Image (cartoon, grey):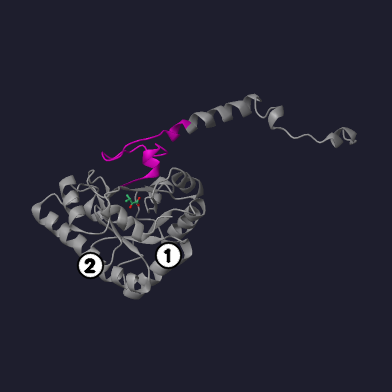
Amino acid sequence: MRTTQELLKMKQQNEKITMMTAYDYPSAKQVEAAGIDTILVGDSLGMTVLGYESTVQVTLDDMIHHAKAARRGAPNTFIVADMPIGSVGISDQQDLNHALRLYQESGANAIKAEGAHLASFIQKCKQIGIPVVSHLGLTPQSVGIMGYSVQAKTKGAAEQLIQDCLTMEAAGAIMIVLEVIPSDLAEAISKKVSIPVIGIGAGNKTDGQVLVYHDVLHYGQEHRAKFVKVYGDFSVGVEALRTFNEEVKSGAFPTEAHTYKAKVMGELNHD
Ligand code: KIV
């Protein structure tokens, strides 16, 4: 399993870091089998597996439940689990209790929290031993305020984002996820901070890349952002299910090959 220190070394040695979302036992198992460096149990599970419109409905209990399943599927992969909306940024005591619950109960190696207002939270987590990944740029929990558009496009906003990343690093963040920002800005930030920067929709000059499993495998997701590359096609599963439906209705399934027999049945008296 990768460690925080190894991930840092990968950045220092210009070795790209891979991260893929996984939200349950089989997907985490696949991500681990593929040799991907890290798993993100993202609150994007709200859309991809729970069928919500956004991440806004996801709860801390949802995240713990899914992160535990991912942990069972990928016992040897560095797992980051998302703090969902409202679980952090409310009050110091409550924030830390939530962070501790997510970290302890899920068995994740780090937690991730959205927003530049969380420097003191990150600092306190570090003090009590919880590694935190900061998520900046487009932060989907704030969809009601910022939408899903490209962030930090003006000079002022770009300068602010650079400053925020430096603040997160100083607070003790172990990594930064930068979502949907111009690639030259992401490149500049990746050079400025010494912790790994993982991009999504942030060009190819960050220290690593993260994508969403269901996007990458075309699995239940029809909407496709510009930054997504589809590497596989799980939508073919529908054809298999259609065939099952037809075969059961026509009597073609189950066949002898899928049927158990007990010799004793011939000896029973039954009408
Ligand atoms: O929840 C998630 O999947 C994420 C990624 C988009 C980075 O935060």
Residue at the outermost left position: 155
Q: Which mark is residue 170?
A: 2
Residue positioned 58% across, 26% down in the render? 246
Please provide percent x and percent y for residue 11.
28, 53
Left/right placement of residue 16 relative to residue 184 reads: right
Q: Residue at x 18, y 54 (%)?
A: 191
- x, y percentage for residue 85? 34, 60
* Rendering coords of residue 63 (x, y %): 43, 58
Q: Main secondary structure of the magenta part?
A: loop
Q: Residues within 10 Å of mark 2 (few under 14, many from 20)?
A: few
Mark 2 residue type: Ala
Residue 251 x/y as whole percent:
66, 25
Residue that numbered label 1 is attached to:
103
Q: Residue furthest front?
A: 13
Above or below for 3 versus 89: above
Q: Quadrant of residue 258?
A: top right
For mark 2, give the secondary structure.
helix
Mark 2 and mark 1: Cα distance apart in space: 22 Å
